[in-house]
Image: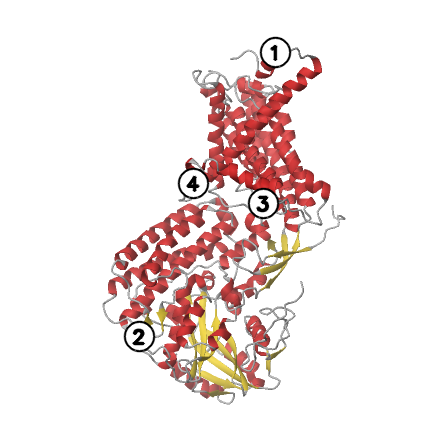
Amino acid sequence: MIAVGITVALKEILASFGLSGGLLSVVTYAILASATFGLLSVLALFLVWWERKIAGHMQQRFGPMRNGWHGWYQTLVDGLKLLQKEDVRVATRDKVVFFWAPVMCFIAAFAAYIVIPFGDGLIVADLNIGILYIMAITTFTVISLLMAGWGSNNKYALLGGMRSAAQVVSYEVPMVASILVVVLYAGSLSTVDIVNSQAGNFLNWNIFRVPYGPLAFLTYLVAAIAEANRTPFDLAEAEQELVAGFNIEYSGMKFAMFFLAEFINLFTVSAIAVILFFGGWHGFEFIPSFVWFFLKTFAVVFLLIMIRWTYPRMRVDQLMEFAWKFLVPLTFLNIIIAAIFKHFGWYWEL
Amino acid sequence: MSNLRTEEFDINMGPHHPSTHGVCRLLLTMDGEKVVKVVPYIGYLHRAIEKICENRTYAMCIPILDRFEYVTAMSCNYVFSLAAERLSGIEVPERAEYLRVIMLELNRIASHLIFFGTTAMDIGALTPFLYALREREYIMDLFEMTCGQRLTYNYIRVGGVSKDIPNEFTPKCRETVATISDKVEEYKRLLNGNPIWKMRTIGVGKLDADLALAYGVSGPILRASGVDYDLRRDDPYSIYDRFDYNIPIYQNGDVYDRYMIRLDEIQESCKIVAQALDQIEDGPIRAKVSPNFKPAAGETYTRIENSRGEMGVYLVSDGTKKPFRVKARGGSYPHLQLLPEIATNCMIADLVAIFASFDVILPEVDR
Amino acid sequence: MNNEELKAYIESHYGSQLTYNEAGKYDLLFEVDASNLVTVCEKLKNDSELLFDYFCNLSGADTTERFEAIYNLASTKKKIRLDIKVILPHENPVVNSVQTIWPAANWYEREMWELYGIHINNHDNLTRFLLHDEWDEGFPMRKDWDAPDFIRFPDL
């Protein structure tokens, strides 16, 4: 385990150039933020391409094939195309809200990465309220979707925005409740502490700790799909019902921002799943920790993509019933079970 | 909560909307997610096919009528040819009858595959659409092999068919129907066990037999509501009495039954095609009919069982080489008319599911 | 019940209102007076021997001297078919609506009104739907209709 995190190391390097005090912090975090931003942008581009490839192969076709080997830079040229496109704005829009909605969505998607450890020590800031912070910041997405729906001055968009608000607020409860199970065990909200509590043998991962692990993971996964607005819970942009939902009036780069944010969110929920249930960066020592982290996260992403291209969409009332009548009681029950097991020490530590 | 002010709002679903399958406009009055009122507006695809046909000879009408219902263009060809043959009393050679049955049933399969794909897509599952198109592609290849066209065939003519099938058609067709029959089982496995699919379809858009009959609903939708009425058997035409096949009946009349009945019909059609391929013998494929032939004066309403219900042509001849009146009746027309009756007071997602389960195709409605 | 039996039955029971017309080549075609249409249709639907519960189609036709409205009926229980023709004058053609008997007739009647100008009495929604709302170029399916060189489309 690296004793000092990347932040500390970077600070030391910068301090050797003579920076100090407030300026040192600002420069350090600016560098880290740009690095994270760059990494995530590439990641989002990759995820878009990857999803299209998987979807293609699931559907008896190849997906993008033209640009490069198996179309590897397809999303890049798609992005360039979107960048050049005219930014069509409806005359009747709410100017301020319409403009800020995609920006906010984008920021909310990226801000969560402050506390996500990509590897041993590879974390921007190890906040002691890490998980709580992620929950709080990702909820901003819903506000931005609602803003997009309202600001577009379009009935389909409004319906989409309202749907996503109702959906995300409902699924926040089972999501937090399933996370609480892990927090209960780890005794900390910090992401690094949670990962370290699963160190050692892979049987220490929360998913394998009887009996609350698998159940908490499943309920988390369901809620996470709903949070990421993906099929079977993609009601906010249900193409066949609401045409494109909240982003119906967005074009060009504003649309691209929503689109990229969606894929960043996909990666976020998968990364959180790995941190909480799959032991984060831990694995066999001879492979670097960040490789483990990415491998595990991509495995979860793969699962989510498979789910998306397999299931039909739920109806909005069924979605709500499922959240409040099934998931919420189940997760609460799970917390109680986990608490009992924790109290009597009925879990292993290998 | 009760003193919160809410109001209904109107929303235009269409003319360009992913799930209206063409250019149909539904004016919805919504109360939040709930549809309070549906008013269908049609006519965006009105091409005056009936008027055009009045100015064409009989042979020239057939390619025009291809466009009447382009998903099952064989049926359009057939129903018009049958009407003209009934007016003039032309006897169609045996082999031509078999070829017609093979083509009609293959086209029914292709149409039901489109239904399967688009319905699944409208309910949110995108993948089955591509599976269905993959199987449909084999049928399109068979059609292309036979008449050179993939969508609008102009194959079935008055007095017979335009071309004989090539030699490689028969083995390939046998293989295709066997494959599709298997694939339908796969589709059933793919969706029927899926709880979300069941939640979305079972009990949604219930249509009881009385309402269906009152609105002139026909075809698979009528049979899904428990009315045993299939024109292939009950108003016999062609040689359907020589084949052994079942007519699937379902009782509930919801989206799920309408979906299941079509999958079953695909398998039954596969059986018919396989039997027809066994029974077909060599012979002439066309009766001698002049391109400018003049049927005797008279009129007939001819109807056949199409994949979307009853397809009929009311044909009046005044003894000249042009038809005096052609009225094309498509199955979707009464179905769309019925939509407000059963889609009122459901969720917008259910409306989409119901619309998809009716398998409405707009060129057939607007003509 | 085959066509001969059906013809005999209708002629014995409805002979006063329905007259046989041999123009129908394959199907039975009967003519009915416009004033009797609704009552006859009602009887045909409720007659326990016929049970014409299924409304296939309604088409208008213009023979340049007169208008015709042809109702194609079927029975799902008795598996029989029947056509009924109503002959209307070329000036002021009016026919009564049968949508109280078969709700399916609604759109067919609307279409006939729109394309042939045959007015429908007691119709609940006689508005244009195949042509656009402001259409005033006459009734296009009539034989004497001449396509205008230029069709004005409504300002949107």
Residue receiving disc 3: A237
Residue bearing mark 4: A65
Mark 3–mark 1 CB contact (< 8 Å): no
- Secondary structure under badge 4? loop
- On what subunit does the disc labeled 3 rest? A
Q: Secondary structure at mark 3?
A: helix
Q: CA distance from mark 3 to mark 1?
A: 47 Å
Of marks 2 and 4, the one in the foreground = 4
Instruction: Identify the residue shown where x is 44% and y is 55%.
Output: B114
Amino acid type indicated by mark 3: Glu
Residue A320 visible from this viewpoint: no
- Mark 2 is on which residue type? Val
* Badges 2 and 4, same chain: no
Q: In this picture, is B259 found above or below A79?
A: below
- The kind of residue tagged 4 is Met
**Neighbour tally class for label 3: few under 14, some 14-19, many 20 plus, Cα within 10 Å:** many
| Crowd around label 1: few <14 · some 14–19 · many ≥20 (10 Å) | some
Quadrant assignment, res A272: top right
Pinpoint the chain carrying mark 4: A
